[in-house]
Amino acid sequence: MTPELHAGKPILLWLRRDLRLADHPMLSAAASSGRPVVAVFVCDEVVSAYGAAPRWRLDAGLRAFLPRLEALGCPVTLRRGPALETLRALIAETGAGAVWWSRDIDPQAIARDSAVKSALKAAGVEARSFPGQVLFPPWEVQTGQGGPYRVYTPYWKAVRGLPVAPPLPAVTRLRPGPALRGETLEDLDLGRAMRRGGAVVAKYARIGEAEAQARLAAFLDGPIAVYRDRRDFLAEQATSALSEHLAWGEISPAQIWHAGARALAEGAAGAETFLKELVWREFAWHLMFHFPDLGRANWRAEWDSFPWAGESASAERWRRGMTGEPVVDAAMRELYVTGRMHNRARMIAASYLTKHLLTDWRIGLAWFEDCLIDHDPAANAMGWQWVAGCGPDAAPYFRIFNPASQAEKFDPESVYRRRWLAEGNRHAPETARDFFEAVPKAWGLVPGARAPEPLIALAEGRARALAAYGARGAKE
Ligand code: FAD
């Protein structure tokens, strides 16, 4: 059925990871269509599979966003159930002739959306998806020989000059369609798995589109100038902190790209490095689109025979921030308390797990997936495989981060470690005490206890990792 035949019929606007009003191609198209719209959010099979912290953060994002859409005359109906079945019921209730959504290129979302698209089309309902999640759709960027990029630098060179459409203005009005009955956010209870620590994480999270814009403005106003030189320092606020907003679509990558490009044109010292980091996110999505197993299987098959350890008491101590390696424990506690972790700390903690503890990277990936409020399936998978050494464009396995020298270099005054470790410090700051507040009582952790003994001496862990690597016989 052609779109003309649907003219006048309501459009279902299916909201997902796109919780903003500005630079939102789907909302802009809906506003200019003049057609009545019914906005819906469905707690479906993909949303239910998110980790605890991502679901909690999504709930918080919806709490901020829904009233803003409602203020434009577009209340959002909340439903629960498998996506296709739920959308079919909504179509029957509203007489909608179309379902629109913003594309999500997470493989789970692609599988869901492809099935929805074909079923709706077969039923004569228009199914239309819109861009916005990435700057450079992975199917549009190819190497000279054809096929996907596997290495970052040539990818960066290929995309840096490509045009990026200027951000669209915020929608200001939508024509409401029929009112529907739905559930409340309390009914959906997306944050239920975070009851133990949600109240603590909430102190550190910043939610919504206005916060995202404020963070971008603050970053452009200062830290961008020192971004290149200071972004690795663990205790500093030298990065943008935009990842938690990007993950939920509270800001678009195009808004950040254009702001970064303006800063570059005005001579901001760190602007190019910042744009390059934003393009690491693009590269991750590029990889994940072309290699949907990125979060499940070793990118390089020769790693399948590597003797990774599985679940163990050591992996559990890593998760609990109790390895006895101060910078690793600080990082793991930052994650638990704030739902975020400094990028260099992510690398140090991931390297310690996969190399010093010889533990399968998928165990670490799953913990991050459960704890990160900025969880991004592509960046997380790429990050873990990169650090473990089995990924595309990865750090060679024998390059093992030494947590002690990393800490000396990037936390020279111990500010980061003191911020997150309470052991042996009767005047530990609130951040460190919040960890004990947030963790489940069953962990039996108390502030003031003695610092844990190291799980393994660093030199011994390094030698063991190198031996395992050597035994594997891979040439690197
Ligand atoms: P800034 O330094 O201000 O960078 C701006 C934006 O660029 C970020 O918001 C992010 O979207 C992108 N970016 C920066 N560095 C990277 C990178 N290395 N890879 C991909 N994109 C990048 N990032 C996530 O957003 N979600 C994750 O789940 C995630 N998991 C990771 C797991 C591991 C093991 C590692 C090593 C990295 C992971 N990253 C992840 C990448 C990176 O750590 C975060 O994007 C960054 O710390 C976010 O902070 P920021 O917004 O202040 O970044």
Image (cartoon, rainbow, N blue to C red):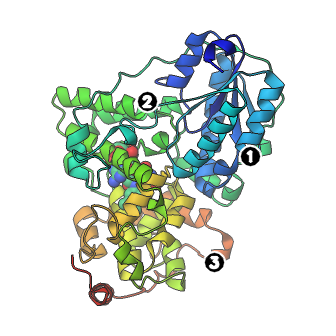
- Earlier residue among tags 2 and 3: 2
- The image's mark for residue 444 is 3
Q: Residue at x 58, y 67 (%)?
A: 436
Depth check: give the residue in front, 108 or 278: 108
**Amino acid, disc 2:** Gln
Residue 49 pos. (x, y %): 64, 55
Foreground disc of the pair 2, 1: 1
Label 1 belongs to which residue? Answer: 82
What is the C-alpha distance between the residues marked 2 and 3?
A: 40 Å
Q: Residue at x 74, y 16 (%)?
A: 177
**Amino acid, disc 3:** Gly
Q: Determine whether, in the image, residue 339 is placed left or right of residue 126.
A: left
Structural crowding at the residue carrying mark 3, measured as other residues with C-alpha within 10 Å and reported as few (<14), some (14–19) or many (≥20): few
SS state under label 3: loop
Ligand 1 near label 1 (Cβ, under 8 Å)?
Answer: no
Depth check: give the residue in front, 98 or 45: 98
**Amino acid, disc 1:** Pro
Depth check: give the residue in front, 426 or 248: 248
Q: Residue at x 74, y 46 (%)?
A: 82
Task: Quadrant for the N terminus, please.
Answer: top right
Label 2 belongs to which residue? Answer: 213
